[in-house]
Image (cartoon, rainbow, N blue to C red):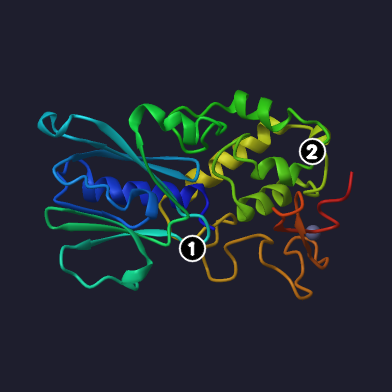
Amino acid sequence: MPEGDAVWRTADRLRRALDGRRLERTDVRVPQHATADLAGATVLETVSRGKHLLTRIEEPPEQGGRAWTLHTHLKMEGSWRTYRRGERWGKAGHLARVVLDAGDVSAVGFQLGIVELLPREREDDVVGHLGPDLLGPDWDEVEAVRRLTSDPERPLGEALLDQRNLAGIGTIYRTELCFLTGYDPRTPVAAVADPLRMVRLARTMLDQNRHIPQICTTGDKRRGRSLWIYGRRGGDRCPRCGTAVEHAELGQPGVERVAYWCPRCQPPR
Ligand SMILES: [Zn+2]
């Protein structure tokens, strides 16, 4: 699943393709919005909020002058691609959920996990629950710490993934953050000595990766070296101490997600 930095990059790509353009044809291929037609409206901007994308669109006065937000979420498989109008798409047409044609550009959202068209004033209904956005203009590290530690018994790995605490972390950053700070992901958040350092490190990691396609946490972008321990299994060793890396699906039943840790560098507490 794309993490916050990849979603930020998607918003950036959509901004460059669509900001300020008048839509000539729109096709929203989900049942609840199958009849929506935004042709004639102008795209103001696309912003990311954690892993959510908000594309703000405004109708001209003669069409009603309404302000809309197209809310999309990539979930597991989703992506937004931009093409020159008429260019062959890189993915099968039946996977498209949204098509926005403007000038010589087509922006196509494939396999999106969420597609909904909302009146602008209702944006908070879909992103108001999110904690501070690690790559947002309103990033607030004190509030992020407050939320992250608000349930003292909660396992750290679970609290880091909860987008209501801080928005943008997925399974890769969770594993790498716990490794770099030396905490077993099952550690209760109350036992984390310096949660401020943890959220600052999270912000630095996402910020350093926002312009590059593959997540790198080690500073070494070479294949197989870019992450400390995420994805190491089958007896793979910790690059720091040589102990076999462990992994498990962690989290509440039904929403377990994979985590990796080194039992020596990240001892149980
Ligand atoms: Zn180790």
Check disc 2 and report the residue beneath it: 154
Note whether 99 is above or below 4 in the view shown.
Answer: below
In space, the residues marked 2 and 1 are separated at their CA atoms by 29 Å
Q: Position of residue 171 (x, y in %)?
A: 63, 54
Q: Quadrant of the C terminus?
A: top right
Q: Quick one: label 2 or label 1, which is nearer the N terminus?
A: 1
Circle 2 residues within 10 Å: few <14, some 14–19, many ≥20: some
Instruction: State the mark number for residue 259.
Output: none
Badge 1 amino acid: Glu
Instruction: State the mark number for residue 77.
Output: 1
Q: Position of residue 64 (x, y in %)?
A: 17, 30
Question: What SS does tag 2 mark?
Answer: loop
Occupied quadrant, residue 121: top left
User: Is residue 158 toward the left or the right of residue 244 in the image?
Assistant: left
User: Is residue 90 toward the left or the right of residue 208 in the image?
Assistant: left
Quadrant for ligand 1? bottom right
Q: Residue at x 65, y 41 (%)?
A: 162
Question: What SS does tag 1 mark?
Answer: loop
Note whether 222 is above or below 228 in the view shown.
Answer: below
Occupied quadrant, residue 155: top right
Q: Position of residue 220 (x, y in %)?
A: 55, 61
Q: Residue at x 63, y 36 (%)?
A: 199
Q: Position of residue 21 (x, y in %)?
A: 16, 44
Number of numbered labels in the structure image: 2
